[in-house]
Image: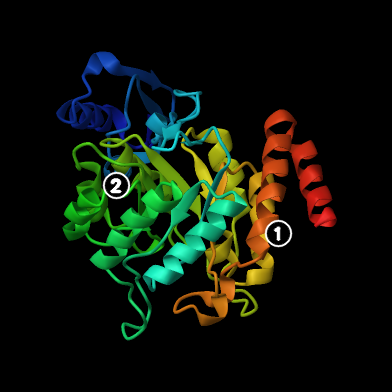
C-alpha cells in the first residue's frame, strides 16, 4: 500500500502517518519513505490487507491511498495459481470435472422430487439440487417444505446416488443441514452480503462445501469479500454467477458472463453459472448455459422439473426434455475449452448451438 501526503502536510503530517501505522501494527522498519519537493510517499512493505484504506484516506493531510497487492490475495491466482478443487462423496470434483447441478427450484412433494431426480440422473447430472427452504418475494407464495424437504433430499440421494445441494437461509438451520448431511450448502443471492450469517457458516466444524451466489447488483469485489469471509474458515467455496435485474422488461435477469471470465482468470475458486435464474426464460437457459461454459465456467446449475407447467415455483424457467439435450452439448464445450484456447472454445460453442 502507498500513502501519498498532500504538499502542505510537511514533516509533521508524515510523522502522524507513521504514528498511525505503528498503532495499526506496522513498524517503521516496514516503511519506505520517499520525499520530493512537493510530496511525501509512504510505502508499506509486506501484508497490508488488514489496514483500513478508508481510515487513512480520511486523514486531512493525506492526498490519496493506493493498494498495490490484491486485497483478496488468499483467493488470487497471483499467490495460489492452482485451481481449488472441491471433492464430493460420489468422487465428483468441482473445479476439475464438468459440474451439472440440476433439479427442482423447490421441493414440492416426494413424487415430484424423486421423478425429477431420476430424470436428471439418467440424463447425466452429477449433483442434485432441491430447495427445502424457499425465499419468496411474497410471503404467501409457496415457501418450501422446510425440514421435510431436507429429509426427502437425504432419501433421494440414496436412491439415485447423487450428492445434493440446498439453500440454507438462516444460521438457526445449521443443525438441520448437519443432521441430514447436505453435501453442498447454498448461500442464496439475498444472503450474499449477510456478513453475520456468512461468519456463522465459516465457523461450522467439519464444514461442507458452500455455493455462494452473487446477489443482485453485487460487485465482483463485494462477492470476493463475501467469499473470503467464508474461505477463512472453510476453503471449499464455489462461486455462482446468476445475473442482475435490469430496466429491460423482456428479461427477468441478464446473465453477466464478464464476471465468469474475470473470476476464472484472476482467482482460483470454482465458478459455476446459473442460467435459469440468470435469464428467467426457459428457451434462453441452454444457450446462455453454453455461453457460460465457453466463458470459463466449471459447470452449470439449472432448474429441472418433470412437470414444469405444474411447478409451484419458477416453472417458466425450468427445463424438462431440454435438459437431456443440454448435457452432451455442455460436455462438448467443456472438453473443447479444456483442450483448446478461448477462441476455439467459443467457436465450438457456436457449432454446438448450430447443431442443436
Relative to 199, is 344 above or below?
Answer: above
In the rendered view, does 269 fall on the left or right side of 42? Answer: right
Figure quadrant of residue 64: top left
Q: Residue furthest bottom?
A: 140
Q: Residue furthest top?
A: 29
Can residue 242 be seen? no
Relative to 318, is 293 above or below?
Answer: above
Badge 1 marks a residue whose secondary structure is helix
Figure quadrant of residue 190: bottom left
Checking the image for residue 58, the label placed there is 2
Q: Position of residue 301 (x, y in %)?
A: 52, 55
* Quadrant in which the C terminus is drawn: bottom right
Residue drawn 44% across and 63% down? 114
Per the image, the residue denoted by label 1 is: 287
* Quadrant in which the N terminus is drawn: top left
In terms of depth relative to the viewer, which is nearer, 159 or 225? 159
Badge 2: few (under 14), some or many (20 or more) residues near its Cα, within 10 Å?
few
In the rendered view, does 227 fall on the left or right side of 276? Answer: left
Q: Position of residue 167 (x, y in %)?
A: 35, 59
Q: Position of residue 211 (x, y in %)?
A: 40, 49
In terms of depth relative to the viewer, which is nearer, 235 or 39? 235
In the rendered view, does 28 fall on the left or right side of 334? Answer: left
Residue drawn 67% across and 32% down? 338
In the rendered view, does 283 fall on the left or right side of 229? Answer: right
Q: Earlier in the sequence, mark 2 or mark 1?
A: 2
Amino acid at each position: 500500500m502507498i500513502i501519498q501526503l498532500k504538499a502542505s502536510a510537511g514533516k509533521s503530517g508524515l510523522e502522524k502517518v507513521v504514528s498511525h501505522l505503528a498503532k495499526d501494527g506496522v513498524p517503521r522498519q516496514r516503511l519506505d519513505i520517499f520525499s520530493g519537493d512537493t510530496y511525501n510517499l509512504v510505502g508499506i512493505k509486506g501484508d497490508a490487507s488488514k489496514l483500513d484504506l478508508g481510515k487513512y484516506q480520511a486523514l486531512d493531510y493525506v492526498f490519496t491511498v493506493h493498494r498495490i497487492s490484491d486485497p483478496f490475495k488468499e483467493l488470487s491466482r497471483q499467490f495460489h495459481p492452482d485451481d481449488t478443487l472441491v471433492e464430493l462423496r460420489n468422487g465428483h470434483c468441482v473445479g476439475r470435472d464438468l459440474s451439472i447441478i440440476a433439479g427442482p427450484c423447490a421441493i414440492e412433494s416426494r413424487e415430484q422430487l424423486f421423478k425429477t431426480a431420476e430424470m436428471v440422473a439418467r440424463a447425466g447430472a452429477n449433483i442434485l439440487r432441491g430447495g427445502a427452504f424457499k425465499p419468496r418475494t411474497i410471503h404467501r407464495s409457496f415457501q418450501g417444505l422446510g425440514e421435510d424437504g431436507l429429509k426427502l433430499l437425504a432419501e433421494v440421494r440414496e436412491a439415485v446416488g447423487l450428492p445434493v445441494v440446498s439453500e440454507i437461509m438462516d444460521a438457526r438451520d445449521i443443525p438441520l443441514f448437519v443432521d441430514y448431511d447436505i453435501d453442498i450448502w447454498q448461500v442464496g443471492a439475498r444472503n450474499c452480503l449477510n456478513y453475520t450469517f456468512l461468519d456463522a457458516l465459516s465457523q461450522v466444524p467439519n464444514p461442507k462445501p458452500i455455493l455462494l451466489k452473487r446477489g443482485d447488483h453485487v460487485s465482483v469485489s463485494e462477492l470476493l469479500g463475501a467469499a473470503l469471509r467464508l474461505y477463512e474458515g472453510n476453503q471449499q467455496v464455489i462461486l455462482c454467477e446468476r445475473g442482475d435485474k435490469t430496466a429491460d422488461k423482456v428479461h427477468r435477469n441478464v446473465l453477466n458472463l464478464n464476471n465468469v471470465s474475470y473470476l476464472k482468470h484472476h482467482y482460483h475458486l470454482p465458478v459455476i453459472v446459473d442460467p435459469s435464474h440468470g435469464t428467467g426464460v426457459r428457451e434462453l437457459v441452454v444457450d446462455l448455459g453454453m455461453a457460460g461454459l465457453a466463458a470459463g465456467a466449471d459447470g452449470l446449475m439449472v432448474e429441472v422439473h418433470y412437470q414444469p407447467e405444474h411447478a409451484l415455483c419458477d416453472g417458466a424457467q425450468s427445463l424438462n426434455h431440454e435438459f437431456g439435450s443440454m448435457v452432451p452439448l455442455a460436455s462438448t464445450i467443456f472438453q473443447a475449452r479444456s483442450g483448446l484456447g478461448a477462441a476455439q472454445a467459443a467457436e465450438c460453442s457456436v457449432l454446438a448451438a448450430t447443431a442443436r
